[in-house]
Image (tube, rainbow, N blue to C red):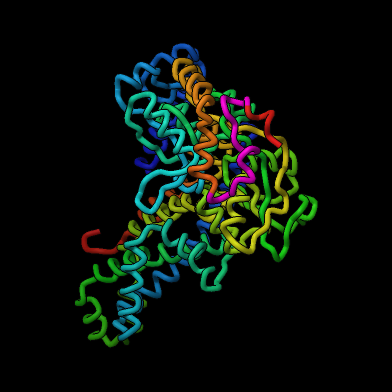
Amino acid sequence: MRRTKWFAISFLAALGVTLAGCGQVSAGSAAQAAETTDDQGSKAVYRTLDEIKSDGTVNIGVFSDKNPFGYVDENGAYQGYDVYFAERIGQDLGVKINYVSTEAANRVEYLETGKVDIVLANFTVTKERAEKVDFALPYMNVALGVVSPDSRVITDLSEITADDEVIVISGTTAETYLTENNPEIKLQKYDTYANAKNAIENGNGVAWANDNTEVIAFALQNPGYTVGIPSLGSQDTIAPAVSKGNTTLLDWINDEIRALADEQFFHKDYEATLVDTYGLDYEESLVLEGGGAAATAAP
Amino acid sequence: MDAAVLHEYLPLYAKAALLTIRLGLLGVLLSILTGLFCAAVQYLKIPLLRIIVRVYIELSRNTPLLIQLFFIYYGLPKIGIRTDPAVCGVAGLTFLGGSYMAEAFRSGLEAIPPIQEESALSLGMTRIQAAVHVILPQALSVSVPAFVANVIFLLKETSVFSAVSLMDLMFTAKDLIGLYYDTTEALFLLVVFYLLMLLPVSILGSIVEKKVRYAGFGT
């Protein structure tokens, strides 16, 4: 009995220390946290442009299971629209690229803890996210979409009954949108794209809500599914993100995106990576050159 | 750390903890039954069944729960067996826990020297009487520490339930981080809730252990 008591006491003590530590972190000034390079809980830990260049390797967070935007092909190499751009960034920075596979829900954390220098993982720009990370100029348009099996195509959210569950991926804009605007809809949450895809194929939910690019690709690749709601919520953009306050890297990426407009880089990217999935029909509506110059030309 | 955020998250964590406890305990209970059955089959050396149990134990102990859940939840529907996430979670936990429990009970049974059974038989007891009055009480008492460790292990293993869309504690924390990015608060509550859940089990376990560890010589 006495031993148990001692355990309990030392436990509470340890918990207290942890608590105190947490308090300090949030109280610490942001400026101080940004300067420090230790990764012990401080908010924004990042490497500047010069540090990345002298190190010779840039860490880029990409998806590994989101075909055709960021995925690993049969040879184990990263491919896709985001990766095509990442390759160019590595080339123009003159450094090697270390790809870090990320899930939707940990993109912000990876930047906050300095696990990656840049996130190029189909990262939709939102107000909440912009408070935590710095977005560069956008390079793609996106909205939300809902795909469902042909046997029961959902064309409006009102068709979803109280018994139905809608599949979403944890940490995506689709989850946020439905949580805020349609709290009555029951969500079935998955942690990865691969699991969500498997779940809709197995019929675990009546529909899958996600970026419309993703659900359109899914319906095109898998017969028997229709995108009943092709555009939901507001039109958003997708942009690279860096750790909050990493201005040297952010400015460099912005200059890069502006410079790439001259060679219509993202059109080439689309034609190299997305055309097999979407055909040419979506090119003008999806691609953004120079951070938005092409947006006005979109149909 | 923001107290308002903690307050706001509490109900969600309570709900998740309830789900974790409910599925976890059900899984533990079924694991015990599976374990007892397997240990009995091995102890009584029932032919054929004994081999099946051996294969099951090795298969279950040498594959991670995550893989077992994937198989049940994403694999079985391909051949027409679809399970609800909660059923899948309990089934996975039972599949994994059954073998651990079986091994715990078996180690208890094997710790009792054969001379005890022989002595009981020579006193005129039947095999069943010997098992019930002599062997089992001692065997169970010997296997209690391993048993308690298994219970805690199984409850902690529920943290991979997120793979099958179950909103357990772990997934709730990850999900909230993905939605609102209050990483510190979400992770802090995660640790606190796991402790609140497992500390009583651990303490209760050591009390039970002291009460029933009477087997063996010299105690």
Q: Nearer the viewer, residue B141 or A37?
A: A37
Task: Give left or right: position of B162 versus A126.
Answer: left
> Residue at left 59%, top 35%?
A287
- Residue B12 in view in this figure: yes
Q: Going by the picture, which residue comes out furthest to the front?
A: A263
Q: Measured from the top left, where is residue B182 in percent x and y?
A: 56, 30
Q: Going by the picture, which residue comes out furthest to the right?
A: A158
Q: Please say if B143 is above or below A170.
A: below
Q: Nearer the viewer, residue A288 or B140?
A: A288
> Residue at left 37%, top 74%?
B38
Q: Measured from the top left, where is residue A146 in percent x and y?
A: 68, 50
Q: Is residue A281 magenta?
A: yes
Task: Give left or right: position of B112 versus B153.
Answer: left
Q: Is residue B136 magenta?
A: no
Q: Nearer the viewer, residue B26 or B169?
A: B169
Image quarter hosting the C terminus of chain B? bottom left
**Bounds of the magenta segment:** A276-293
- Residue B10 in view in this figure: no
Task: Give left or right: position of A203 versus B148.
Answer: right
Question: What number of labels is visible?
Answer: 0
Image quarter hosting the N terminus of chain B? top right
Q: Please say if A39 is above or below B91.
A: above
Q: Measured from the top left, where is residue B54 in percent x and y?
A: 31, 74
Q: Nearer the viewer, residue A245 or A22?
A: A245
**For residue A172, which quarter of the picture?**
top right
> Residue at left 62%, top 47%?
B15
> Residue at left 45%, top 64%?
B71
Q: Measured from the top left, where is residue B148 in percent x and y?
A: 39, 56
Q: What secondary structure is the stretch in magenta mostly built from?
A: loop
